[in-house]
Amino acid sequence: MSQQPAAVDVLVVGGGQAGLAAGYYLRRTKLDFAVLDAADAPGGSWQHYWDSLRLFSPAAYSSLPGRPMPHQAGQTYPDAEHVAQYLAEYEKRYELPVHRPVTVRAIEDTGDGLLLAHTDTGTWLTRALVMATGTWSRPFLPALPGREAFAGRQLHTHGYRTAADFTGRRVVVVGGGNSGAQIAADLAGQAAAVRWTTLRPPRFLPDEIDGRALFEIATRRVAGDGPRISDLGDIVTVPPVRAARDRGLLTARPMFERMEADAVVREDGERWPCDAVIWCTGFRPALGPLAALGLRGGAGRIPTDGTRALADERIHLLGYGDWTGPASATLIGVGRTARSAVAEIQQLLA
């Protein structure tokens, strides 16, 4: 006999910062809800980041709704382990109904107003769905001639942990965003040689701008005032990045065009022999379970109004970046979009 599906008013898929923010606001309603998280432990993607990673903002400006992040002793900018511990404590403090490890494989429309989630542990019926899976599980690697022929080590930001793994190695770091700059800075002085390569010249934000200022800029943009963050730069100059830059260790080179067994090769034929390539080339939203619902638009992205999917008002996408709300992929920013998403769901189900 097949097991009957569990049933809730709202199902949240993902137990990282976005899922917990949604849970916080759902807990304040009369709606029955559950959070399904594929990870073995709380902490979201923060439990998997590299050792030297630091937040862009002090703890006081990196908090989820309702619970300030405690200060980390000896650190102005908390590390990833501190954030993971904070998320675990947050989940426990608000007694959020997180089920883990549960992997959601597919979502289907039952045809009678409900959505059915198929997981590796059973099925769930729900009246509304919040997708908060983030991007960490979908690292993006560009298609580049010779990449499969390279005999050295290749890894993505997703797999990088510590510079000590590359002691004495010649490393090429690819990517002009925060991850590329931070990992190149982390490796400087540890690896035998580090070359940082980017598609476009890197743009450092002014030194005085940290995550708090970025959130304030995003907030002003919502009100239609002030510059876009992208107008100011791409890379936050956290202390390690600033130190490496000021020592002349963060000079970016133009992107190479192909790879060989033991080197990367620029368009002009210059070869850079190397032992490892670290791809800091970003991530894609982990929205595979929604594929059967046909929500994607012509450009491949699910069109939304705020967080709500235009093709299905029962479904909200939370925490995927400016696409689903300004600063919504940040700790301090996701609360605002979580609150509005839950308010819309509450109105829909009333």
Image (tube, rainbow, N blue to C red):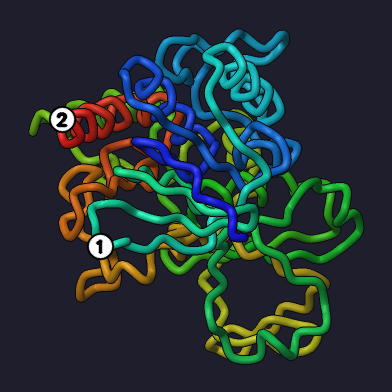
Q: Which quadrant is home to the C terminus?
A: top left
Q: Which amino acid type is marked by label 2? A: Gln
Q: Which of 57 and 83 is in front in this view?
A: 83
Q: Is residue 175 visible?
A: no
Q: Residue at x 20, y 59 (%)?
A: 303
> In this view, which residue lies farthest toward the left?
224
**In the drawing, does residue 112 fall left or right of residue 123?**
left
- For residue 347, which numbered disc appears in the image? 2
Q: Which residue is drawn at 28% across and 25% down?
A: 339
Dot 2 alpha-carbon crowd within 10 angstroms: few under 14, some 14 to 19, many 20 or more: few
Q: Which quadrant is home to the N terminus?
A: bottom right
**In the drawing, does residue 257 fall left or right of residue 117?**
right
Q: Estimate the x, y position of residue 211 in percent, counting from the top left.
A: 42, 27
Q: Estimate the x, y position of residue 186 in percent, counting from the top left.
A: 72, 44
> In this view, which residue lies farthest toward the front?
1
Q: Which of 148 and 264 is in front in this view?
A: 148
Q: Which of 263 and 250 is in front in this view?
A: 263
Q: Estimate the x, y position of residue 255 in percent, counting from the top left.
A: 53, 73
Residue 15 picture quarter: top right
- The tally of labels here is 2
- In the picture of the structure, the residue carrying the numbered disc 1 is 111
Q: Which amino acid type is marked by label 1? A: Gly
- Badge 1 or badge 2: first in the primary sequence: 1
Give the Cα separation between the discs numbered 1 and 2: 21 Å
Task: State whether residue 347 is above or below residue 199.
Answer: above
- For residue 123, which numbered disc appears in the image? none
